[in-house]
Image (cartoon, rainbow, N blue to C red):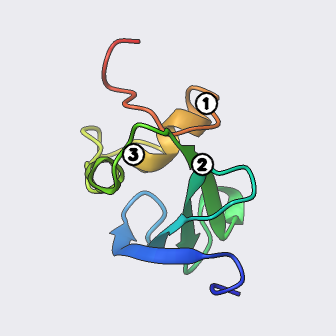
Amino acid sequence: MTEARNLRLIASLHCCEYQTDAECFIEDALPWGRRRLVVRYDNGGCAGRREFVAGIPDDWSEQDVMDLLLSPMKDPSAPYPSWEVPVRAFGSPKLLRWWEPR
């Protein structure tokens, strides 16, 4: 399945918010020319979903994505990991620097 979707592994990490391990991929070569972040959870993420997907802004480098993935939430009781905040808290279809003023 990974090859068919053009997924490139960029990180393996532990997701404290869901108490599971996660593999993070960049999905390249989409028909519409965009990239997406795909996170697969070992034991289910939010509401038991095993996969999270969000668009990557065109001007973001792979390092920008990594910075977001590795940014710990300041509140230990936060309900989502940092990469899910743009979608779950702000309703954005793409990743964003949610801690910066918009």
- Name which of mark 2 and mark 3 comes first in the sequence: 2
The residue furthest right is 31
Labels 2, 3: front one = 2
Who is closer to the viewer here, 80 or 11? 11
Can residue 63 be seen here? The reply is yes
The amino acid pointed to by label 2 is Ala
- Residue that label 1 marks: 92
Mark 3 to mark 1 CA distance (whole Å): 13 Å
- Residue that label 3 marks: 82
- Name which of mark 1 and mark 2 comes first in the sequence: 2
Q: Residues within 10 Å of mark 2 (few under 14, many from 20)?
A: many
Numbered badge on residue 54 = 2
Who is closer to the viewer here, 14 or 25? 25
60 vs 48, left or right, is: left
Instruction: Work out which quarter of the rendered image holds the C terminus and state it.
Output: top left
Q: Residues within 10 Å of mark 1 (few under 14, many from 20)?
A: some
Where residue 99 appears, x then y in whole percent?
Answer: 32, 25
